[in-house]
Structures are given as C-alpha cells and as structure tokens.
Image: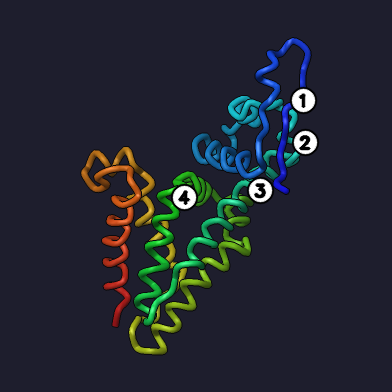
Amino acid sequence: MPNIVSKPRRRGRPGGCDERVVHREEMLTEALKAFAEKGYDGMSMRELAAKLGISHGLIPARFGTKEQLWKAAFDQGMESLLAQVNTIHKGNTAEDKLRNAAVNLLVSLFKFPAFLQLANYEGARNTARLDYILESSAHQKLIAVFKEIIDEGVSTGELKSINPSLIFFLIAHGGGAALCSQPLTSKIDLLKSDELDSAKEVAEEIVEIVVRGVKV
C-alpha cells in the first residue's frame, strides 16, 4: 500500500482544501524540482507544502530536516534513472549495449530534467551533498553499467579502454544539457519540439558521436 500524506482538517479553512492527499512519490518529485530550481539554500519546505496543498508541518513530520528531504528526493530520482538504464542496455555487441544504455539514459533525463539540473547545481559546489551523490549506491551502480559495457568492448576488441566515469559524464552532463535545457535548445533549433520522439532523435545523434569516439 503506497505511503500517503493527507491534510488534516483545520478550523477556518475551506472544506475543499482539506481533501488533498499526496503520495510520497509526488512529494519527492516536487521536492527534487524545487531543489533543482532554487538550489538547496533557496528551497523552502513551507513553499513546497503550499504548492502541494498540504500543511507545512507534514513534510518535516514525514521526512525530517531539509537535508533528509533532499537525500530522499535524490535517492528516488537516482533509483528511477538506474532502473530505466538497467532495463534497456541489451544488444548483441558491446557497441550496441553502449548505444542502448546511453540513449535510454538521455531519454530518461529528458523526461525528468530536474534530476540533471540538481546534479549540475551540486556538482559546482564542494559540499557533503555532492559527496552523497557520488557515494550513493545507485550512482555507483549506474557507473558500473557503463564500466561493464566498456570492459566487455575492450575484451572483444570493439571499444577503447576509457574511464567509465568519463563516458557517463559526457553522455549525462554533456549530452543531457542538449535535452534538459529546452528553452535554449529549442531556440537554436537543436530540439525541434518537446515531444519524446524529437528527444530520442537528438539522443541518438549525441550517442553516435560518443560511440564513434570510443570505437577501436
């Protein structure tokens, strides 16, 4: 049964406002968007509660401090990203697997750009939150996906020996910017629309450039 947070009835508030029920996943999704947009220091738990239509005390009651909320929001986003990449990195060759994993990673970031925006924000600051990102089991598993593919490609003579973290960085942060900075990319005619098919087309072009660079 999903974890939910419901708004208790308060005197003087309209009855319609008291019916708001928020699932844990929705709370963390909106929290991640808020952290990505405003940064850790600028993000307000009270403003988040107002946006969700719940009492401002329910978020700390459910998640604790702002730092704990940030960690929970990041963990949910990272696990979702890892699940997407792990489900589609099949192929007959290491090259095929690299293409599939990379395209799926980019498409996943396009679907939820706040995750990449958050990672970029924290990546520019030497904080405990950045350490948390890099040390998280989900991040390590995501890097391991690309390491496994690169190692296989090296053993079969298909791919060069490349640091998997570099491949991940080029794809996620480099290529991801082309899909997650939609106001910019649409104006320079890189991303023709905000439709998934357009994003996948751009993702495939980005990945083709990367794969050509690591092929033997």
Tell me how far mark 2 sits from mark 1, CA to CA.
Answer: 13 Å
Q: Position of residue 63 (x, y in %)?
A: 73, 41
Q: Amino acid at mark 4?
A: Leu
Tell me how far mark 3 sits from mark 1, CA to CA.
Answer: 23 Å
Front of the two marks 1 and 4? 1
Q: Toward which corner of the image does residue 95 lie, by quadrant?
A: bottom left
**Residue depicted at 57% across the width and 32% down the height:** 42
* Callout 2 touching callout 1 (CB < 8 Å): no
**Residue depicted at 34% across the width and 42% down the height:** 182
Residue to which mark 3 is pinned: 72
Closer to us: 199 or 126: 199
Q: Toward which corner of the image does residue 30 lie, by quadrant?
A: top right
Q: Amino acid at mark 2?
A: Ala
Front of the two marks 2 and 4? 2
Residue to which mark 4 is pinned: 116
For label 2, count other residues whose C-alpha is less than 10 Å away and answer few (under 14), some (14-19) or many (20+). Answer: few
Secondary structure beneath dot 4 equals helix
Q: Which mark is residue 8?
A: 1
Tell me how far mark 3 sits from mark 4, CA to CA.
Answer: 16 Å
Q: Amino acid at mark 1?
A: Pro
